[in-house]
Amino acid sequence: MYLEQFKLHELPFRLSPDPQFLYLSKQHARAKAYMESTIWFTDGFVVITGEIGAGKTTLIETFLRELGPEVVVAQINQTQLSPTAFLQTVLVQFGFTPFDMKKPEVLATLNQFLTEQHVAGRKVVLIIDEAQNLSYRVLEEIRMLSGIETTKEKVLRIILAGQPELNDKLNSRELIQLVQRVRLRFHLAALSSAETVSYIDHRLEVAGSQGRRIFAEDTYPTIFRYTGGVPRLVNTLCDTSMMAAFGRESDVVTAEDVTAALRELQWVEFNARTNRMQLLQMDGETAPETGQTVGRILLASGGATIVERELKPGRLVIGRTPDNDLQIDSKFISRHHCQIVTQPDSCLIEDLNSTNGIFVKSKRVRRHNLNDGDVVVVGQHEIMYMDERQPRNRQPLETAEQESDKRD
C-alpha cells in the first residue's frame, strides 16, 4: 500500500470504526455527551440518529472504550429479530445461554440479572445500533425492559442509535408511550466545510503525518463538494485519491488526483444525489432555530450580565468547552456542566455529573424544575430564568422604585 510513500504508520481512511481516529466535531462531542449522560441518569432513553456514514458506530465504540469496570454492557447490532429472539440476544450479551428458554423464563432471568447488578453497585447499559430496523413489537419489549426498577431508580440504561427512519418510527402513534420515556434525542448531521478540513488533517495526524500537508490546499473544497461532509464518504474519496497519488509516485495528493478518484468512483456532486442529510452548519453558519420561545436565561458573573439566551423546545448544554451550546470559560465549570431541557410547558435544569455542581437557594441539586425568577449558581456564575409563556407579574424596576418612594 501507500504507507511508506506517504511516511505513515497506519491507513488514515479505513471505513471500519476505530475510536483512535474519532474526530470530535461540535455535533459529535454533543452526541457523545448525551451517551455519557446515561451513566449518570437512569430515567429514559437516549436516541442518536444520523445518516449512513455520519459516525454513529465510531461514537459508540469510543463511548464503550471509556467505560469503567463498574459498567456492564449489552451491545446489539443485529436488529431484524422477533421479540423473543431479541430478548435472548440481550441475555447472550450478558453471558447466558437462553436458547431453550421460553419468553417468560427469558424475562424472569433478565429481571433477576438486572436486579443483582444493581445490588452489586454495577450499572447496566443496553446499546442498540441500527435501531431503525426494530419492529414495533420489539420496541415495545424494550419499553417494558426500561420499566424494571428498584424502589428508587430504573436499573437499565438504554441507548438507541439508528438512521433517520428511527425518528419516523418513534413518532408513530403506536409508540407514544415509548417516546414519552425518551430523555435525550439528537440528530448527527454532516460536517461543515471547515470541519471536513479538520477531519481529514486529524486522521492524517493520527496516522503519522506529523503536521505534513499531504493533501494540497485546493483539494479540500472539491472533497467537500462531492462528499457533503459525510465522514464515510470523505474516507472513501480521500483513500482513493491517495491511491491515485501513489500511482504517480507522489507523496502529495493534488486536485488532479482527486479528479481521477472521482472518475474511478463515478461520483456526482453531493447536492445532486438523493440524500436526506441536512447540513446543520455550512461554513460556520448555524441553522435557524424553530419553535416558540418558552423562556430565556441571563448568564451573569459579579453582578454583570454576560449573555442572554432564548429557550425554545429542545436542550441547551452548558459547559467549559466550545462544543457546548453555551460556553462558560471558567476553571470552576466542568467540560459538560449542566443542561436545560425545555418543553412547551416546562423547563428543567440538570447537573451533568459536574465537579462543582449546580445550586438553587444555596442547596446543591441534581435537577430542578425552573420557575420564573429562579437563580441557579454554577461555579462563579449565576443563571437567572425568566418564563416567557405568560405575562410576568413582577413590575419593571423603575416602577417598583417609584412606588416605594411614594410609600416612604
Image (spheres, rainbow, N blue to C red):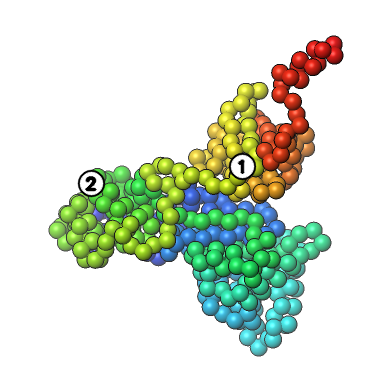
User: In x, y percent, where is residue 50?
Assistant: 48, 60
Tell me, yes or no, if residue 202 can be seen here: no
Q: Foreground: 62 or 55?
A: 55
Looking at the image, is 91 positioned above or below residue 326? below
Looking at the image, is 371 positioned above or below residue 175? above
Q: In front of the other: label 1 or label 2?
A: 1
**Marks 1 and 2 close (CB-CB < 8 Å):** no
Give the mark nearest the N terminus, 1 or 2: 2
Q: CA distance from mark 1 to mark 2?
A: 43 Å
Q: Foreground: 294 or 406?
A: 406
Classify residue 399 as left or right of residue 184: right
User: In x, y percent, where is residue 115?
Assistant: 75, 68
| Corner quadrant of residue 1 | bottom left
User: Which residue is rendered at x = 68% and y = 86% of the image?
Assistant: 101
In the picture of the structure, the residue carrying the numbered disc 2 is 218
Q: Element at badge 2?
A: helix
Looking at the image, is 89 positioned above or below residue 237? below
User: In x, y percent, where is residue 153?
Assistant: 76, 59
User: In x, y percent, where is residue 213?
Assistant: 26, 46
Q: Element at badge 1?
A: loop
* Pointer 1 local density, CA inside 10 Å: few below 14, some 14–19, many at least 20: some
Tag 2: residue type?
Asp
Classify residue 231 as left or right of residue 248: right
Q: Which mark is residue 293?
A: 1
User: Which residue is rendered at x = 51% and y = 67% of the image?
Assistant: 165
User: Which residue is rendered at x = 64% and y = 82% of the image?
Assistant: 84
Identify the image quadrant of the C terminus: top right
